[in-house]
Amino acid sequence: MTKKSIVFLTGAGMSAESGISTFRDSNGLWENHAIEDVATYEAFERNIELVLEFYNARRKQLFEVEPNEGHNLIAGLEDDYKVSIITQNVDDLHERAGSKSILHLHGELRKVRSTADERLIYYWDKDVIVGDKCKKGSQLRPHIVWFGEAVPAMEAAIDIVNSADVVVVIGTSLQVYPAASLMDYAKPSAKIFYIDPKPNISSSERLTVLPLTASEGMKLLIEKHL
């Protein structure tokens, strides 16, 4: 018997309970930095030390946090469902919870890549400093999709969403494009759920809104809807 296919689209709210700050706080800053100062290629060219320091701090934080109940509940569904995760998050909490099929739309903190050849990607658990170079001799940069850069994984993400029987959106404002458009690619027969403590959309015939945290929403989803 073929397992039902569930795809999870996860954003910053998915990891908030683990202690990872949401990307953009209410004051428009990320960890007290303006987005344009740490999350664009222009910022990297303008002040490489600041940008590297910023992501080095984010990487170190990963070793201080653990997957929360929401991550663990998603991973636990793999016994009974075909589970895929498409995440805007750059942490590795889904992996550490035990999930197997994870597509990172916006990159990964524990990887770096060449500034000369984006195909040269390395696992990296220490600080990146000026002078760290790829095998071709070019400076390494965080393996992060910055504002203004293309999202290479979008086509694969669209295919995953389009094949799902159930689409669950967790902890994302649905305002950062192109990721925000992914829900629109769900097939007409798919059920869609949106889990967020402060949802900016309402339930409809096709969409069920669960105004809860990631962990609370996952518990209710499993108990009442799957």
Image (tube, helix red, strand yellow):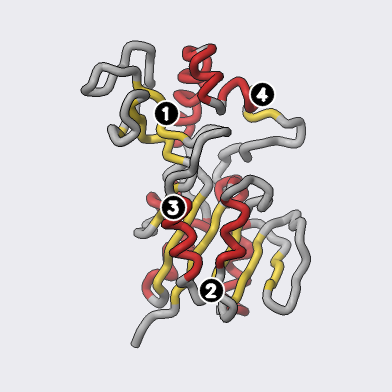
Up/down of 35 relative to 102, above or below: above
Q: Residues within 10 Å of mark 1 (few under 14, many from 20)?
A: many
Up/down of 190 relative to 95, above or below: below
Q: Position of residue 24 (x, y in %)?
A: 67, 36
Q: Nearer the viewer, residue 186 or 123?
A: 186
Q: Which of labels 3 and 2 is toward the front?
A: 2
Q: Position of residue 34 (x, y in %)?
A: 66, 24
Residue shown at 23% from the left, 21% from the top: 136
Q: Residues within 10 Å of mark 2 (few under 14, many from 20)?
A: many
The label number, if any, that marks residue 166 in the structure image: 2
Q: Amino acid at mark 1?
A: Pro
Which residue is identified by label 1?
142
Q: Amino acid at mark 4?
A: Ala
Distance of label 3 from label 1 (alpha carbons): 20 Å
- State the quadrant of the C terminus: bottom right
For the residue labelled by badge 4, is the local secondary structure a helix, a strand or a loop?
A: strand
Which residue is identified by label 3?
94
Q: Which of labels 3 and 4 is toward the front?
A: 4
For the residue labelled by badge 3, is the local secondary structure a helix, a strand or a loop?
A: helix
Q: Which of labels 3 and 1 is toward the front?
A: 1
Residue shown at 57% from the left, 81% from the top: 189
Q: Earlier in the sequence, mark 2 or mark 1?
A: 1
Q: Going by the image, does 163 lie left or right of 190?
A: left
Up/down of 24 relative to 42, above or below: below
Q: Earlier in the sequence, mark 3 or mark 4?
A: 4
Which residue is identified by label 4?
34
For the residue labelled by badge 2, is the local secondary structure a helix, a strand or a loop?
A: strand
Q: Earlier in the sequence, mark 3 or mark 1?
A: 3
Q: Earlier in the sequence, mark 3 or mark 2?
A: 3
